[in-house]
């Protein structure tokens, strides 16, 4: 049997797709990592996909985003490719703690070993390496 360690899927750039992306990630990560790591990876998927839909051209009419997942050595790399935006992703440190929006990358940074972004020919990939609570 071949063990799949990397998987990706394209989703419509709509808010409703975020729960589908979380379910896709959970189904792939569970059994390949600890439950704690799967929970954290699912949180990161939610935040990065939400950012793609709300802050990039992926959320516009006909937009899409790609969720990439890779499991290796007790780590899950979550990547989201979007259609691009005028600004680069950045942690919003100035938001109050009770803010409802603007905390996505703050959360990703808090629960990930590392995160970053890179421009692509069309759009941008934002990624995070999740290692679970035992980090």
Image: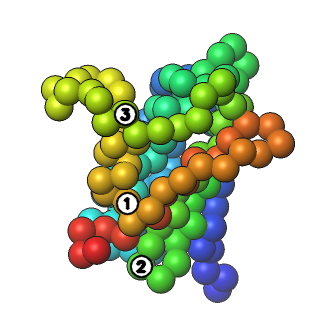
Query: Which numbered mark, 1 or 3, is in the foreground of this view?
Result: 3
Find residue 74 and name its label.
Answer: 2
Image x and y of residue 108, in percent:
38, 49
- 27, above or below 64, in the image: below
Secondary-structure class at tag 3: loop
Image x and y of residue 86, in percent:
66, 24
Query: Which numbered mark, 2 or 3, is in the foreground of this view?
Result: 3
Which quarter of the figure has residue 106? Answer: top left
| Quarter of the rendering occupied by the C terminus | bottom left
Find residue 92 and name its label.
Answer: 3
Q: Residue placed at 60% from the left, 21% from the top? A: 59
Query: Which numbered mark, 2 or 1, is in the foreground of this view?
Result: 1
Residue identified by numbered label 1: 112
Which of 33 and 92 lies nearest the eye of the viewer? 92
Secondary-structure class at tag 1: loop
Q: Residue placed at 24% from the left, 68% from the top? A: 133
Alpha carbon of mark 1 to alpha carbon of mark 3: how far? 16 Å
- 9, above or below 16, in the image: below
Q: Are marks 1 and 3 in contact (CB under 8 Å)?
A: no
Q: Residues within 10 Å of mark 3 (few under 14, many from 20)?
A: few
Image x and y of residue 1, in percent:
64, 85
Alpha carbon of mark 2 to alpha carbon of mark 1: how far? 13 Å
Earlier in the chain: of badge 1 and badge 3, it is 3
Earlier in the chain: of badge 2 and badge 1, it is 2
């Amino acid at each position: 049997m071949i063990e799949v360690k990397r998987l990706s899927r394209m989703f419509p750039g709509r808010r409703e797709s975020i729960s589908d992306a979380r379910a896709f990630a959970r189904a792939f990560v569970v059994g390949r990592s600890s439950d704690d790591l799967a929970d954290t990876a699912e949180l990161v998927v939610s935040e990065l996909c939400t950012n793609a839909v709300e802050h990039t051209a992926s959320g516009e009419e006909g937009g899409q985003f790609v969720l990439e997942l890779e499991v290796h050595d007790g780590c899950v790399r979550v990547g989201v490719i979007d259609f691009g935006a005028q600004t680069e992703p950045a942690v919003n440190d100035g938001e109050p703690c009770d803010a409802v929006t603007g905390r996505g990358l703050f959360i990703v940074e808090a629960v990930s070993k590392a995160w970053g972004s890179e421009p692509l020919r069309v759009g941008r990939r934002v990624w995070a390496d999740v290692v679970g609570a035992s980090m």
